Amino acid sequence: MSGPSPRPDERRFDGTNRAAITALLTRVTRGESMAVDDLMSRLYPELKRLAAGIFRGERPGHTLQPTALVNEAYLRVFGSNTIDWRDRAHFFAVMARQIRRILVDHGRSTRAAKRGAGVARLNIDEIGDVGVLVNEDIVALDEALAVFEKEEPRAARVVELRYFGGLTESEVGEVLGVSMPTVSRDWQYARTWLFARLRSLDP
């Protein structure tokens, strides 16, 4: 898990952008169906970029594609009970949780399809800020993260938000209500812990 690098498109998330998205999310919470369409038209390109980053390094023709990932996450989020949306960071936090679940479900299906033919463990050197192996290997990361979450729930959320949600340290701080230095410390500690855990699982 290499250290976070600045995102070149970070300037897109200025105050005007945040205010516009927050206003749309307020309308969605009120039950305005058109607001959902407006919201997704604004955020869909960003979600697609996130999904493309997640699939970086995957073999061509993978059964789960970025568009399908975004669409499935969208259906899970907006097809369930109404969420009391707070802001753009909260939206991406919810999407991060759904993306994690979708990827893990897909990984488990891939593992089951192999019927015990052997499961490759995640190569920890390939874990980056965004960009995961979208196959059964993601299950190893999810299982390690679940164990870590019992010991350090906040730091585990930092990993989920940064790794699966693509949030910046500042945005993670907004979601969790902590300072950027705290997010940075949690992120560094979590990566060290997960490295050790995944290394111990390597055959």
Image: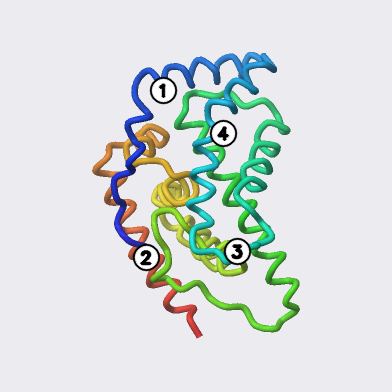
Question: What's the amino acid at mark 3?
Answer: Pro
Estimate how packed mark 1 is, as few (under 14), some (14 to 19) or many (20 or more) residues with alpha carbons within 10 Å. Answer: some
| First along the sequence among labels 2 and 3 | 3
Numbered disc in front, either 1 or 4: 4
Q: Which one is nearer the viewer's eye here, 53 or 18?
A: 53
Residue hosting label 3 = 60
Q: Position of residue 8 (x, y in %)?
A: 32, 41
Nearer to the camera, 95 or 130: 130
Choose mark 2 or mark 4, whichever is in front: 4
In space, the residues marked 2 and 1 are separated at their CA atoms by 33 Å
Q: Residues within 10 Å of mark 2 (few under 14, many from 20)?
A: some
User: Which comes sooner in the sequence, label 1 or label 4?
Assistant: 1
Look at label 1 and name its amino acid: Arg
Residue drawn 34% across the image and 36% down it:
10
The vertical placement of 72 against 202, above or below, is: above
Q: Secondary structure at mark 3?
A: loop
Give me the C-alpha separation between circle 2 and circle 3: 32 Å
Q: Residue furthest left?
A: 181
At a point 40% along the width and 59% down the height, the residue shown is 128
- The residue labelled by disc 2 is 193
Query: Which residue is drawn at the image coordinates 69% and 68% (left, top)?
Result: 110
Of labels 2 and 1, earlier in sequence is: 1
Neighbourhood count class around disc 4 (C-alpha, 10 Å): few under 14, some 14–19, many 20 upward: some
Residue 78 versus residue 31 in the image, above or below: below
Q: Earlier in the sequence, mark 1 or mark 3?
A: 1
Q: Foreground residue, 130 or 90?
A: 130
Relative vertical location of residue 24 with respect to residue 130 in this rendering, above or below? above
Badge 2 or badge 4: first in the primary sequence:
4
Query: What residue is shown with label 1?
Result: 18
Secondary structure of the residue carrying tag 1 is helix
